[in-house]
Amino acid sequence: MVSVSEGNTVEQMNVNEQVSTAEKKSINVEVAYATLKKQKIRAVNVDAGTTLGAAIVQSGIMMDFPELDLENAKVGIYGKVASMTTVLNDHDRVEIYHPLIADPKEVRRKRAAEGKVMKKGSG
């Protein structure tokens, strides 16, 4: 075994080097939000290890959409819901979702109660 100072093994040194390298590295992500009238996609360079929530704040997208309620908004990466604490990877696309206008299940129930036939592919 190779002798390492301060009682660390070679494996521990390699892990520590990887962590410190990741801390210094930056990644590129996009933050996207849209309303019926306006959409924005912001490219943001953030530190590796940045969370989804932090990237949204750093993007400044809330300046364009002051009505955006980030506390209650659902968010995701490439169409998959994620939490604000999810750590991002290089080239992730962060998406902020707005609430649905109508509940799809309720629309289907109403349509079925009225006896309307749904066509294939129509939700």
Image: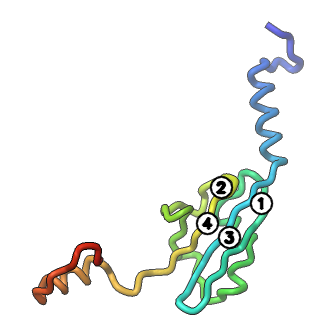
Q: Amino acid at mark 4?
A: Val
In this view of the protein, which residue sits in the foreground, 82 or 7? 82
In this view of the protein, which residue sits in the foreground, 97 or 19? 97
Q: Tell me which numbered mark, 3 or 2, is placed earlier along the sequence.
A: 3
Q: Residues within 10 Å of mark 2 (few under 14, many from 20)?
A: many
Q: Amino acid at mark 3?
A: Ile
Q: Tell me which numbered mark, 1 or 4, is placed earlier along the sequence.
A: 1
At 49% from the left and 61% from the top, the residue drawn is 80
Q: CA distance from mark 1 to mark 4?
A: 13 Å
Which residue is disc 3 drawn over?
A: 56
Is 16 rendered above or below residue 58? Answer: above
Q: Quadrant of the N terminus?
A: top right
For the residues bearing labels 1 and 2, Cβ distance under 8 angstroms: yes
Q: CA distance from mark 1 to mark 3?
A: 10 Å
Which residue is disc 4 drawn over?
A: 94
For the residues bearing labels 3 and 4, Cβ distance under 8 angstroms: yes
At 78% from the left and 27% from the top, the residue drawn is 14
Tell me residue 4's x, y (percent). 86, 16
Q: CA distance from mark 3 to mark 2?
A: 11 Å
Residue 88: numbered disc: 2
Tell me residue 123's x, y (percent). 29, 77
Tell me residue 116's x, y (percent). 14, 86
**Secondary structure under the numbered disc 3 in the rendered image:** helix
| Lateral position of residue 17 relative to residue 86, left or right | right
**Secondary structure under the numbered disc 2 in the rendered image:** loop
Q: Amino acid at mark 1?
A: Val
Q: Quadrant of residue 59?
A: bottom right
Q: How many marks can you see?
A: 4
At 68% from the left and 57% from the top, the residue drawn is 91
Which residue is disc 1 drawn over?
A: 46
Q: Tell me which numbered mark, 3 or 4, is placed earlier along the sequence.
A: 3
